Image: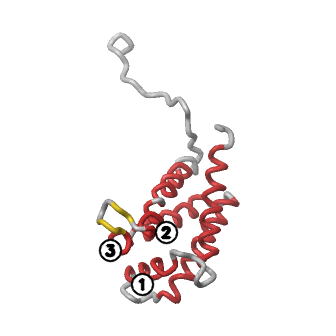
Amino acid sequence: MAAHGLTLLRLALGVVFLWFGALKLFPGLSSAETLAGRTIEALTLGVVPMAVAVPVLAVWEVAIGAGLIIGRWMRAVLLLLFAQMLGTVTPLVLFPMETFSQVPFVPTLEGQYIIKNIVLISAGIVLGATVRGGQLSPEPVVATRPSAAET
């Protein structure tokens, strides 16, 4: 697992983004497209209408997915991922009556769909920790202060 875990995590995350993004390219296929479009419209104060927001989001997600699968330009890909995730969680604040049946403890199906993104964000953080050559260690060495006898 240690040898291939990060690669599998990156590929799995890439498939999710590629798949969900591709669905948004075809009107009516994504259960999230209306809420996503309305969120972008609200965040841009109506400057970006739903008809533009959803295809742009779709291409954005496909680009994230492709980047993760290819494994190149990871810093840029993860920057896009975190920016997209920031937008993804905003419906919980902007549209609480649609994302919760009992605010804030009982999410609707849409709310559950959004809340599960915590896992995607966490996966992105793990991948981000290794982008610049960092490694995950199963048994990290903890620094300690030298004792008086050692100084």
Residue at position x 53%, y 55% from top?
Answer: 124
Foreground of the two, 142 or 125: 125
25 up-or-down from 103: above or below:
below
Circle 3 crowding by C-alpha within 10 Å: few under 14, some 14–19, many from 20: some
Q: Which residue is mark 3?
A: 97
Residue at position x 41%, y 78% from top?
Answer: 39
Task: Report the coloring of the rendering.
Answer: secondary structure
- How far apart are the alpha carbons under marks 2 and 1? 14 Å
Residue found at the far top of this picture:
149
Mark earlier in primary sequence (2, 3): 2
The amino acid beneath tag 1 is Glu
The amino acid beneath tag 2 is Gln
Mark earlier in primary sequence (1, 3): 1
Tags 1 and 3 touching, CB below 8 Å: no
Tags 2 and 1 touching, CB below 8 Å: no
Circle 1 crowding by C-alpha within 10 Å: few under 14, some 14–19, many from 20: some
